[in-house]
Amino acid sequence: MAPIARVWGAAAEHRYRRGEAYRCPVPVVCVGNFTAGGTGKTPLALLIASRLEALGARPAFLTRGYGGQTSGPHWVAPDHDTASEVGDEPLLLARTAPTLVCRNRAAGARVIVETGARHGAIVMDDGLQNGALQKNLTIAVVDGRRGVGNGRVIPAGPLRAPLEFQLSLADAVVVNVPESSGEARPESDFPVWLKHHFGGPVMRARTRPVGDTGWIVGQPLVSFSGIGAPERFFHLIEQLGGRIVERRVFADHHAFTDREARDLLAAARKHGARLCTTEKDWVRLAPVGDMGALRAETLTLPIRLELDERDALRLDGLLEASLAVGRGRGA
């Protein structure tokens, strides 16, 4: 796979560097990851939007809408749009702030600027390897357990482009560290490597459940998930006292079928258990037919990313600086 990986990596760099990047008058904060698969990018984007809101900047999300049919520009309507139309992540983002789906990121940024809604900042979701839009701040998120795997580019490894190139694009890195107790796989050595090879801030975050989790304790559960790192979700359920009697793993962004819905409902009846999944999986369940029945019977565990006080202050400082530079540039 190494020769193909070299071609893939070279193509990724070429795509980034081709053409002139659009210089947006609104500050752009980019959230991305070095690898394919789940790292906690969406929870980080939500955290950044909430911090921008607290700093007085009304954010809007800009996303390509991976897994959806809409090329955009299209403002997501979470009460009407479906995951098959706009993708699952935009539906989650739109619960927090206005969200625009647009495959052409520069065109999407122009639409946000031209709406007249006076958005104080754009949070560019999954844009680390996209060079069409200039960024004021770029933050990459890394899974603390997996790091960058074998350090090779797709398909020889998990990297989306050569690591040295991607590090040059990032201003800061957030390491999504695993819970320590009972974790089957400990944290990788990559965070330590980062501190010696990356000149920017390296912050640490943890995934935390939000809301009441008392329903999980002692509850037999059929848990299913089609995200990049489903083991994180299953482990969190067990950490909270849930008893998983059966787990079903699907591919990331999996489009569920009625047949799978019937199988999951039957499994829950067989075990006398409740069904449980992630918010990202739940929004991909159509509200009709057997999937509608599964949607109605399935509980979700909302999660958020949390930084310790020191790193939260560092993040706010980075965001404040990017807002100041961006506003000055747009004046």
Image (cartoon, rainbow, N blue to C red):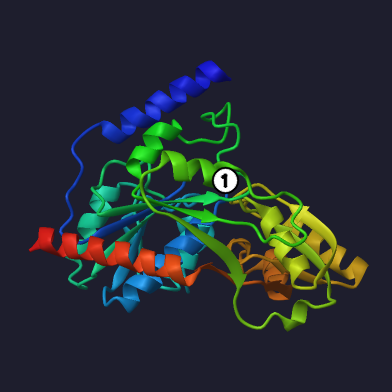
* Location of residue 106 in the rendering, given as x and y in whole percent from the top left corner: 24, 49
Residue 169: image location, x then y, percent: 33, 42
Query: Which residue is at a point 36% across and 49% down the rendered structure image?
Result: 200
Q: Is residue 318 left or right of residue 4?
A: left
Helix, strand or loop under label 1: loop
> Which residue is the site of mark 1?
37
Residue 290 position in % (x across, y down):
72, 65
Residue 267 in which image quadrant: bottom right
Q: Nearer the viewer, residue 76 or 10?
A: 10
Residue at image location 73% in from the left, 51% down from the top: 249
Q: Residues within 10 Å of mark 1 (few under 14, many from 20)?
A: some
The answer to whether residue 213 is left or right of residue 72 is right
331 shown above or below 186: below
Q: Is residue 69 left or right of residue 165?
A: right
**Residue 315 vs residue 132: left or right?**
right
Picture layout, residue 105 above or below residue 269: above
Q: Quadrant of the C terminus?
A: bottom left
